[in-house]
Image (cartoon, grey):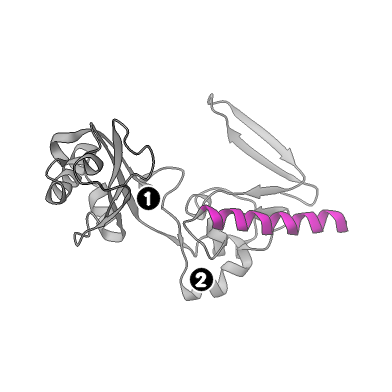
Amino acid sequence: QDDKGVTVNYVDADGKAATLKADYCMCCIPLSVLRQMDVGVSPKFKEAIGAVSYALVGKIGLQMKRRFWEEDHQIYGGHVYTDDPNIGTISLPSTNWQGKKGVLLGYYQFGGNAAKVSALDVAGRTALALEAGQKVFPQYKDSFETSFAASWHRIEHNLGGWAQWDETSRRDAYPILCEPDGRIYLAGEHLSYLTGWQAGGIESAWQQIAKLDKRVHAA
């Protein structure tokens, strides 16, 4: 960036390098990814970007051949809370009741447990989830069809589930990042007090757009 505008170099969906120029940039890239990029901001802003840690988070979806929790147990939606930290929560779908199939949330784990489970391949993660679910529902393994697992800290364009602020980073880095650095503004759940939620991202965007609007109209 310079005093006249912002230039963004990127690679499009077809793998072609391209450049985009604008008066301002509203950047919604997670700080976990942004701190690894060559961004034309001040040293103070770069330091603030690097001051925020991100949550280790893992989930797995288990597709079942039939909705046994509804058919056999008359359970419609809700959560099963386990004492296994590698599993955490098992959640039942709150949509398509009485449908032919359904997808359960097989686990939802955090921190060190999420890191440990993410070291397994999908087959290993699936086996872990099925063993736990079988203890709750005897139909679990027989009804299983296929699975999909995600570990946000290992996804290239996320590198974490959400921003984790501590008292020091909220005090020192958060106020810096909420203000523009030259012509670059940041927005996202990481710049809110509702981290990990779409509501936080939306609130952050509203606030930054309002600042930019005021700046442009005052010019």
Three-letter amino acid code at disc 2? Answer: Ser
Q: Residue furthest top?
A: 14
Q: Label 2 neighbourhood size at 10 Å, few (<14), some (14-19), many (20+)?
A: some
Q: Position of residue 109 (x, y in %)?
A: 29, 55
Mark 1 = which residue? 153
Instruction: Check if residue 208 falls in the magenta segment.
Output: yes
For the C terminus, the image quarter is bottom right
Q: CA distance from mark 2 to mark 1?
A: 20 Å
Quadrant assignment, res 213: bottom right
Quadrant assignment, res 96: top left
At horizontal 53% and vertical 56% (from top left) the residue drawn is 189
Three-letter amino acid code at disc 1? Answer: His
Mark 2 = which residue? 169
Q: Position of residue 169 (x, y in %)?
A: 51, 71
Q: Label 1 neighbourhood size at 10 Å, few (<14), some (14-19), many (20+)?
A: many
Q: Position of residue 53 (x, y in %)?
A: 44, 62
At horizontal 34% and vertical 39% (from top left) the residue drawn is 97
Magenta-tinted stretch: 198-219
Asked if marks 2 and 1 touch (Cβ < 8 Å), the reply is: no
Quick one: 186 or 109, which is closer to the camera?
Answer: 109
